[in-house]
Image (tube, grey):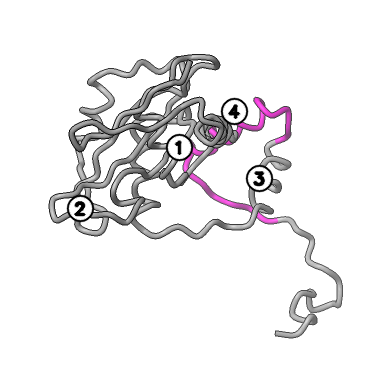
Amino acid sequence: MSDTNHYEKDGNLPSGRFVLRIDPALHLTLREMAQEEGLSLNDLCVRRLAIPEVSLPPEARSALAKAFDVVGKALLGVVVFGSWARQELAAHSDLDLLIVPEEGVPIDRSLYRRWDQSPFAWEGRAVEPHFTHLPAAGARISGFWAEVALDGLVLFDRDLSLSRSLARLRRRIASGDITRRQIHGHFYWVEVA
């Protein structure tokens, strides 16, 4: 492709103006996002379109779409973790998906019911959602979060708060503040005093 293909027939650059028809609900969401960021709708769209596309496998895109369907715009992040992420699958393994909504979203059975309305598989394995909020600063860390910090693969992180939280946990693990122990073949985590 030559550079001349980027010019209009008269030799000038394209105007950059175009009309895009989108679903009214998406338009409203984009307007609200622009307002929250203090941008015009046009500036928000230009910024979003300028971001390089992230290529995810179809199953990951389906998982993200489903998480957005269940949580809506309050979704902060999505992480794949567990045996699938570690590539230690057994015949009966499922795929564990951590879904992190904003603090104001109650974690209750209704989230799981909405997820269960249309279950799907990833590489032929059932996807098990785990809804939780980000750990509060200074809170006691559960083994669950330690495992996610070690082997989780972040698929979506709206504002990097999830990635930063996982990085803090990894630093604490590396410094020995949180250690993994084993008893009778089962692992558990403890915070060292």
Name the residue located 78 percent from the left edge and 66 percent from the top edge.
14
Residue 187 locus on image (x, y percent): 28, 34
Looking at the rendered structure, the kind of residue marked 1 is Ala
Residue 158 visible? The answer is: no
Residue 45 is marked as 3
Quarter location, residue 171: top right
Is 55 above or below relative to 179?
below
Residue 97 visible? The answer is: yes
Could you tell me how far apart the alpha carbons at marks 1 and 3 are, in whole angstroms? 33 Å
Q: Which residue is mark 2?
A: 125
Q: Is 176 on the left or on the right of 100, as rendered?
A: right
Q: Which residue is mark 4?
A: 32
Is 30 above or below relative to 107?
below
Residue 149 is marked as 1
Could you tell me how far apart the alpha carbons at marks 2 and 1 are, in whole angstroms? 22 Å
Could you tell me how far apart the alpha carbons at marks 3 and 2 are, in whole angstroms? 36 Å
Which tag, 1 or 4, sits closer to the chain's start? 4
Residue 129 is marked as none
Could you tell me how far apart the alpha carbons at marks 2 and 4 are, in whole angstroms? 36 Å
Which residues are the magenta region? 18-40
Which tag, 3 or 2, sits closer to the chain's start? 3
Which tag, 2 or 4, sits closer to the chain's start? 4
Name the residue located 36 percent from the left edge and 37 percent from the top edge.
67
Is 83 above or below relative to 13?
above
